Amino acid sequence: MKKIKSMAYMLLIVLLGLSLNTCGSGSDTIDDYIDDLTGRYTISGTVSGAVAANVTIRLTGAETENTTTAADGTYEFDGLADGTYTVTPVLAGYTFTPASRQIVIAGADMTANFTAASSSAATPYEQTDLQATWDVQILEAGNINGWGRYNVTVSAAGGVTFNSCQDSTGSTACPAGPIVWTINPNTGVITETNNGADTDNHYAITLNKNFVAGTASGSSQLLIAQKRVSGVAYSNRDLQSKHFVIHSLMVGGENKWLHEVGSTDANRVVTLTSSTDPSSTDNNAENTGITISVDANGVVTMNGTMSSYRGFLSYDKKTIVGTFTEDGDTYQLMVIQITDGQTGNSVSNVVGTWIDHILAVGGADFWAHQNIAINNTGVMTFSNWVDNDIAISGPDATETIAIGSTGTATIQGTDFHGQLSYDGQFLIGTRTIDLGSEEAYAFHVSILSAAGSTSTTTYSLSGAVSGATLADVLITLSGAATDSTTTSSSGAFSFTGLANGSYTLTPSKTGYTFTPSSLPVTIRGANATGSNFTATSSSSSDQCDVWDDYVTNTCCTTQNNVKVVGIPVPKTCGCPAGTTDVGDDNITAGGPYDLCDCNCD
């Protein structure tokens, strides 16, 4: 669509028309000359794939305009000034990859191409799967060593907004961008543009859409992002008396991997029972009695020698991803996987196609990504190796993986040590890569992809409410899928058609409290039963007894008759009427206690 915006343009057309008629033949048009003289540029491109012609292309931003593609899928907007624009293709019955492109014109013409697919065929991933707030951890190696932590919000169109940023130098500056993520609807692979330009950053998302991992340029970077799922309540109880496996990668002062096994006690004090590095036993590992904590937003911290650690606890409370600085010059990415309740795993849990991302340090610093197909005997076939070091090549032979009952992963003939996630969606591991004259120490994050998977099996999740009320209790399902239902007259409830993954059940009914207040459930190849809750009337006498016996009207400091200091209530009784359970109290004598908010008389 051509634009004539003033009488000055009309005069230019007349003058240039005379000039063109005088100068003879040439490839430039009158509009090209106008654009050159007035500092105006074009955005053009092509739609290919399932449809080409008659696709509406919408331009928004510094200027707003629509056009349609020609028979060959081409389109063009011209006469555009410097500025930021968004180009979006639209046609009923089709989806487009990317769903939109953010383009910055800065003194040059720009291009934005799209691929169309029929929306009549369901795809396992959608662009809106990225729409959320994410906690991102990045480890960088090579010319620059360090870590970065970011909290970002991703829009439905993939635009990334930075809410907070921090790196290992202490800087809080955020990337300038604009950065846009685009998801492949068939594979779950995420690509990234920065300021309208393509990058070689390459990520993948899990089938439950809550975990992203991948590689990025800079020097060599590994990124892990965890979704903040609404409605998830965190407290220090989530980290009490847990068993875990840790995989770490260290860069800078030391360059190596670690895998460790340990536990926490009732006070969340950490004990490591083993620590292994490439030389076998990590003699520098310290069992220092560090305490691990989580706040109400899921942010994880540690004390003592680990005071620089910051991480995030996943929605299912099974994975912590964090970074920290050790000894001033060693930067570490640490993934903690809580294994309590994880049993019955085997190689059948990893059959399928995996997208594997690698960051390696030591003899060579590089990133790589590849596809791994695993069959029902554990044989791994590798393909599509891509890296940022031309001297490195991918595996040229098959390997065989074994999965233990608790999810521990080993690869025959290697020092690979890994851990399958509790929900079976991703696998974290470390290994040493032989480069001939030297070795590289690699950290792997592998994500199960829908690509190549033909499984359509679904399962059910059921349970019951007992106690002070049975019928019409609202049960809300969140996590890998969202839904709600109400209990029957007998207190029973169920959800059907659920895929493997991690879920959370939350009961609610006015006038009642429930124990537990919510319940995490993982479906792994079978129906999940026994998700039960006990209801208590929030105005019952035993609640009042708790108030009288343990508070005796000296419960709090008041300000305008509102409680501002928490009161301890025994966990066996629950919080009294009109109060809210806000986590654990540090009081030990006579405990354990819950901490409540309440109104005061």
Image: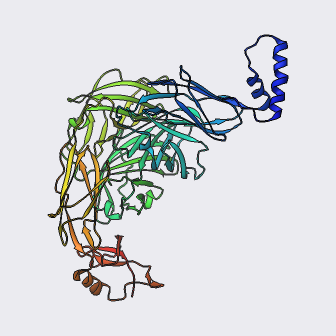
- Provide residue 573's location: percent of width, then percent of height: 24, 76
Quadrant housing the N terminus = top right
Residue at 31% across / 64% down in the picture? 237
Q: Is residue 263 above or below residue 465?
A: above
Q: Nearer the viewer, residue 34 or 183?
A: 34
Here the colouring is rainbow
Q: Nearer the viewer, residue 467 or 344?
A: 467
Task: Tell me the quarter of the picture where residue 8 sits.
Answer: top right
Residue at 52% across / 27% down in the picture? 54
Give the residue at the far left of this rendering: 490
- Provide residue 374's location: percent of width, then percent of height: 27, 29
Is residue 249 visible in this depiction of the protein?
no
Is residue 17 visible in this depiction of the protein?
yes
Q: Is residue 324 above or below residue 64?
A: below
Q: Nearer the viewer, residue 435 or 153?
A: 153
Give the residue at the far top of this rendering: 24
Q: Nearer the viewer, residue 382 or 117?
A: 117
Q: Is residue 43 above or below residue 240?
A: above
Q: Is residue 271 above or below residue 453?
A: below
> How many labels were placed on the picture?
0
- Provide residue 148's location: percent of width, then percent of height: 52, 47
- Provide residue 462's location: percent of width, then percent of height: 19, 54
Quadrant housing the C terminus = bottom left
